[in-house]
Image (spheres, helix red, strand yellow):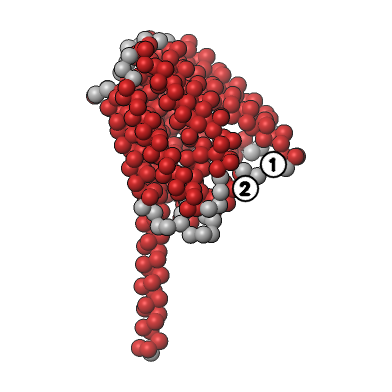
Amino acid sequence: MSTSSAPARGYNRSETSRGSSGSQTVHEYLLSQILYGLGDWIYSLAIVILAYRLSEGLTAAAAVLLFQASGRLAGVPIASSLSSSDRGRQRRLAVGAGILRATLIGTLLLVTSESHLWLAMIVAAAIGVLGPAEENSRRALAPHGMRPRRSGSLRSRFVCRWDQLAMVAGSVTGGLLIMLWSEHAALVVAASMSVAAVALLSRLPNPSKSPSPGAIAVEQSARPAAPRRLGTLQLLMLALAGGAALGIAIRILLVEVVIGDHGSSELVYALFVALAGAGAFAGPISVPRLLGKLPSEIAIAGITGALTIALIATHVADRLPLVVPIVIGCGIL
């Protein structure tokens, strides 16, 4: 019995060690993703407020977000051409893109007057172009433990919705940094978080030759769609573009309503952005069950119409508390 039990104990130790290593990999990857999301939202908040402050108006702030959105649109085919099932290549791409992102955010420290805002717009466009490729490469490196689960548990929901949590925490953190110090201090923290996210990503174990579920998803997403699905995909892309435009308009309008009209601090504006993130986190809990009963065309038209109404309501609301349910509703939609 002692002879047969020894290998069993050794096997258990090996399995435990392997499981512990896998758990550490998942935690490091998730922490890297959260730091990436936190840095991205702090940067996003800081660059909008910086443009608004320096130009003393909405035009430059709107231009910054439009340049970034246009950059993301241009970056989609680039990301598709760079997608691969080679996890080693994807990690190199993710690390390189992360370092470049941190460098671009750092260059915004040179934007100190209205005459320098052209640099902010170039940086916003460049980060927009970089975004899809960096996000795809990061997704391709997802460990097996990060595969979405259907259990619906609170832990699983938090892991799978880390981006909404980063939106909430990053917005509040950015608002606090700007209120206590300045937009440039927030940009320094955002760049530092991007570097930390890259450092964690580079510490992950050497990628295996077999593709991860994330890599397979990226590779499949790059394949041409079947002809019968093209109509649905075109409708979806059009709806996403419209929704993005409305989202940009609402964010810009919130700057004017919160800071300009009501004279509130940058932290209050950040809290409104965080409310949208809270709504986005809560939305997937029940909304798909409702929309699943409707044709996609009707659901998309209804959501777009609701966002349009929300934009108008935000403009006409004369008290900030009235804007709170509107912003939460936008996040859910």
Q: Can you tell which mark lies on residue 139?
A: none
> Can see residue 60?
yes
User: Of 201 and 29, which appears nearest the observer?
Assistant: 201
- Residue 197 against residue 144 in the figure, above or below: above
Residue drawn at the location 30% of the way across and 28% of the way down = 186
Label 2: state its secondary structure: helix
Is 229 on the left or on the right of 163, as rendered?
right
Measured from the top left, where is residue 36 in percent x and y? 39, 39
- Say what amino acid the circle numbered 2 marks: Gln
The secondary structure type at the circle numbered 1 is loop
The answer to which of 89 and 124 lies nearer the viewer is: 89
First reached walking from the N terminus: tag 2 or tag 1: 2
Disc 1 residue type (three-letter): Ala
| Residue underneath mark 1 | 225
Residue at the disc numbered 2: 220
Q: In the picture provided, is 201 more to the left or to the right than 288?
A: left
